[in-house]
Image (cartoon, rainbow, N blue to C red):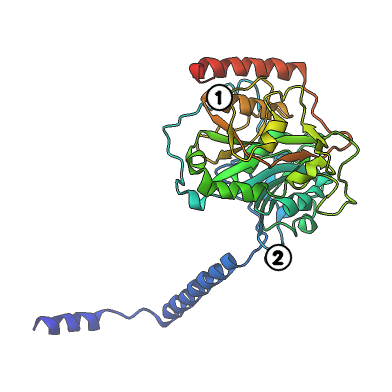
């Protein structure tokens, strides 16, 4: 019969050698064990060092120096990546960055469900100022993405992230004496996974209610958060009395600087302890009006071409990156000029702020070359986007 022929054929087939059967059994056991270990590690919070090529960081290379203990625990949810810009630096020239990444709003930008929106506080910092991290995390309370720039021995970051509820840390080796801020900002953005981000310089501290007010907007101002070309300005303040600042010796809450809306006033006199940060160019920032409003306000116009507010933006594929021609603070000015020219609409969040923590030897003097380059790029943007200005 047919079944009998099939049985005879099976009997004629040689069985695999016994040693190969052992190999197959061992392989199956290893596979099951690795799957189980992977599921365990995903549920644990470990330090992870990435050394292979990344899509966003094509110049990454392995280095034994960057290897960390396999199961080192760091805080509640902290992941660490490494990048070396010294031995794998891509020289950025004016010619190589003349190709501006123009905005194409036709591209989709997910997610659209406001209830799953979240906000990352994104910053870049030097190893000398790592002590600022726990001050930031104490006030923010949400996800943070931090690029730590160092030039020699890789710093130990463990002590500084204990107050962070969720953190992604990228350790970046830079050429000594240079801090390529725009490059560092772009690296941080490439590691940001939340729907929105707020890119802030490390010498600012957020008000303690900022993150909660942003999350409240998921239900109160859904249309603004859903719109990929809307930005939420967070007013930037500085103390009138410049001696009021935080240092390494202060408590993590850094109470000497305002944490809540009521803290910006002197006692009960309602006279402000603060003023708009760099008010000479931040004339668009109507600080007193914005801070005392109860509702989100739309910004009608920018009064100064160097106005560079800190803006919560949606983390879209077509979001312009910082221009890496600029190594200092001008990169932020160019970024704001770009999204403004492209047609972004801007709103101001009420009763929330960033406050400048004045430190000695801080500031980015703008060179005459950077000023000329910025003017040239601004004209290109206005020519390309035209009526959106």
* Quarter of the image where the N terminus is located: bottom left
Q: Is residue 192 left or right of residue 12?
A: right
CA neighbours of label 2 inside 10 A, class few (<14), some (14 to 19), many (20+): some
Q: Position of residue 15 (x, y in %)?
A: 33, 81
Q: Position of residue 346 (x, y in %)?
A: 57, 31
Tell me, for residue 73, which label it has, or none.
2
> How far apart are the two marked residues, 2 and 1, measured between alpha carbons?
41 Å
Tell me, for residue 74, which label it has, or none.
none
Give the secondary structure at mark 2.
loop
CA neighbours of label 1 inside 10 A, class few (<14), some (14 to 19), many (20+): some
Residue 69 image-quadrant placement: bottom right
Residue 334 image-quadrant placement: top right
298 is higher (above) or lower (below) than 225: above
Q: Position of residue 41 (x, y in %)?
A: 59, 67
Q: Nearer the viewer, residue 117 or 271?
A: 271
The residue sitting at the front extreme is 269
Q: Is residue 239 left or right of residue 296?
A: right
Give the secondary structure at mark 1.
loop
Q: At x 61% / y 18%, what residue is drawn?
A: 378
Q: At x 78% / y 51%, what residue is drawn?
A: 135
The residue sitting at the left extreme is 1
Please tell me which of labels 2 and 1 falls first in the chain. 2
368 is higher (above) or lower (below) than 238: above
Q: Which residue is mark 1?
A: 100
């Amino acid at each position: 019969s047919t079944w009998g022929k099939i049985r005879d054929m099976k009997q004629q087939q040689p069985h695999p050698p016994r040693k190969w059967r052992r190999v197959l059994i061992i392989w199956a056991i290893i596979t099951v064990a690795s799957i189980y270990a992977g599921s365990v590690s995903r549920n644990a919070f470990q330090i992870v060092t990435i050394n292979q090529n990344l899509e966003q960081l094509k110049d990454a290379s392995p280095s034994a120096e960057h290897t960390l203990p396999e199961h080192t625990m760091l805080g509640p949810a902290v992941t660490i990546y490494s990048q070396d810009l010294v031995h794998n630096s891509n020289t950025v020239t004016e010619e190589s960055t003349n190709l501006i990444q123009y905005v194409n709003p036709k591209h989709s930008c997910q997610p659209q469900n406001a209830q799953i929106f979240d906000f990352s506080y994104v910053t870049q910092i030097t190893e000398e100022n790592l002590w600022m991290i726990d001050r930031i995390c104490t006030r923010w309370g949400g996800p943070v993405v931090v690029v730590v720039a160092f030039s020699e021995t890789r710093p130990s970051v463990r002590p500084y992230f204990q107050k962070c509820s969720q953190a992604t840390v990228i350790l970046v080796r830079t050429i000594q004496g240079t801090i390529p801020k725009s490059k560092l900002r772009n690296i941080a953005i490439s590691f940001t996974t939340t729907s929105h981000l707020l890119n802030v310089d490390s010498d600012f501290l957020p008000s303690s209610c900022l993150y909660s007010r942003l999350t409240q907007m998921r239900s109160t101002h859904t249309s603004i958060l859903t719109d990929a070309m809307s930005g939420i300005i967070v007013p930037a303040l500085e103390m009138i009395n410049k001696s009021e600042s935080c240092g390494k010796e202060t408590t993590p809450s850094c109470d000497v600087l305002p944490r809540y809306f009521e803290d910006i006033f002197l006692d009960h006199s309602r006279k402000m302890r603060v003023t708009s940060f760099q008010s000479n160019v931040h004339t668009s920032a109507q600080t007193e009006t914005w801070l005392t409003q109860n509702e989100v306000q739309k910004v009608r116009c920018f009064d100064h071409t160097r106005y560079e507010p800190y803006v919560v933006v949606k983390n879209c594929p077509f979001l312009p990156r910082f221009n890496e021609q600029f190594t200092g603070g001008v990169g932020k000015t160019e970024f704001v000029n770009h999204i403004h020219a492209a047609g972004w609409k801007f709103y101001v969040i009420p009763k929330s702020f960033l406050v400048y923590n004045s430190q000695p030897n801080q500031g980015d003097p703008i060179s005459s070359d950077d000023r000329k380059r910025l003017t040239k790029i601004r004209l290109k943007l206005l020519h390309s986007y035209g009526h959106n200005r």
